[in-house]
Amino acid sequence: MGVGGYIAPRHLKAIKDTNNNLIAALDKFDSVGIMDSYFPNAHFFVEFERFDRYIEKLKRRKNIPLDYVSICTPNYLHDAHIRMALRQGAHAICEKPIVINPWNVDQLIDIEKESQSKVYSILQLRIHESIIALKKKVDEGPKDKIYDIDLTYLTSRGNWYHASWKGDVAKSGGIATNIGVHFYDMLSWIFGKVTQNKVHLLTKDTAAGYLEFERARVRWFLSIDYNNIPEVAKQEGKRTYRSITVDGEEIEFSSGFTELHTKSYQSILKGEGYGLEDARQSIQIVHDIRNAKLSDLKGDYHPMLTNKELIKSI
């Protein structure tokens, strides 16, 4: 579901790489020629009702039930589409954020138990080699050590972004949800429960704040504004900049992303994928950021917030 979207080709590749078959696909937009490279024989629908009807007919007339439904639709539709998968007796594989609001996690857990199917979230940073190495280092390090983290993720988006569903907070969850939720999940996975969540800046295209976990203090900055890209990166023609430092040491994870969806599918097919409870804390974090009262720049805050040009432009 959502086969015309940005992330869908990674799912198509993962389905094919794990020797599985795509029976049917759905998207309201019909520019889906990418399917010819993976599953040209899959049925395609632009209306949910006809897609749902086809799935039902396969089950009743030909005794072909779905095993999995892969969900790549806009964030606000994830909850409804996961429910549809569970009603069909299928497992759901859903892109992040698995839902926008934390209370939806509780409701889906109840439906999951009733259906005896599973809901899996794509949390690919957890299987990135650099992040696995960092977790191993923390797990094997001193148990009372508190790490200092700076997270900076700048990924430029054009004017289309705000005209699309991504620019609608009710549909996307806002900037922190859209581009930050997988980082918050990664931090939760490594450093434990959140103990403090402050937001220093929150606009339609830039957000910054301070998070404390059981074992880390995190200053974070996220933006889709090209103006925030460092000059060095701009001179190299880059429109994206990401950096994570742990106690001042840079964690290199700019590469190694190409096969993470396939690895995620391989784990899911073994029954080892990440589920609703795994995603819960990151969903709570982005919900709290979205609804936070802004804090003054006191104590710890991201160094980019000292940029006078940045502050002046907001």
Image: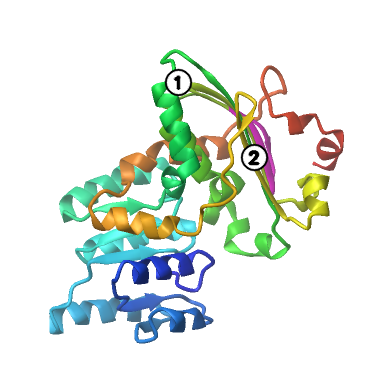
Disc 2 residue type (three-letter): Ser
In the image, 268 versus 72, the foreground residue is: 268
Taking the magenta stretch, the answer to whether it contains residue 67 is no
- Of pointers 2 and 1, the one earlier in the residue sequence: 1
Mark 2 = which residue?
243
- Report x, y in % for residue 268: 29, 55
Would you say 13 lies left or right of 166 here? left
Query: Can residue 200 be found in the magenta stretch?
Result: yes
Residue 117, compared with residue 194, is above or below; it is: below
Give the answer, above or below, for where 139 lies relative to 224. Answer: above
Going 61% across and 47% down the picture, which residue do you hit?
175
Q: Nearer the viewer, residue 274 or 81?
A: 274
Q: Kindly indicate the quadrant of the structure image that contains residue 263.
A: bottom left
Whole-percent x, y for residue 179 in the image = 58, 49
Judging from the image, the colouring scheme is rainbow
SS class, disc 2: strand
User: Would you say 224 lies left or right of 227 here?
Assistant: left
Front: mark 2 or 1: 2
Q: Residue at x 17, y 55 (%)?
A: 115
Q: Secondary structure of the magenta portion, mostly?
A: strand
Kindly tell me whether residue 284 is visible in this rendering.
no
Q: Badge 2 local density, few (<14 within 10 Å), some, or many (20+)?
A: some
Give percent across and percent down for residue 154: 68, 47
| CA gap, disc 2 and disc 1 | 22 Å
x, y percent for residue 270: 23, 54
Query: What residue is rendered at 41% in x and 66% in y?
Result: 11
Q: Which residues are magenta?
A: 199-210
Quarter of the image with the C terminus is: top right
Residue indicated by mark 1: 214
| 212 in relation to 174, above or below | above
Indicate which disc residue 162 carries.
none
Q: Please, what is the three-letter code of the amino acid marked with disc 1?
A: Glu
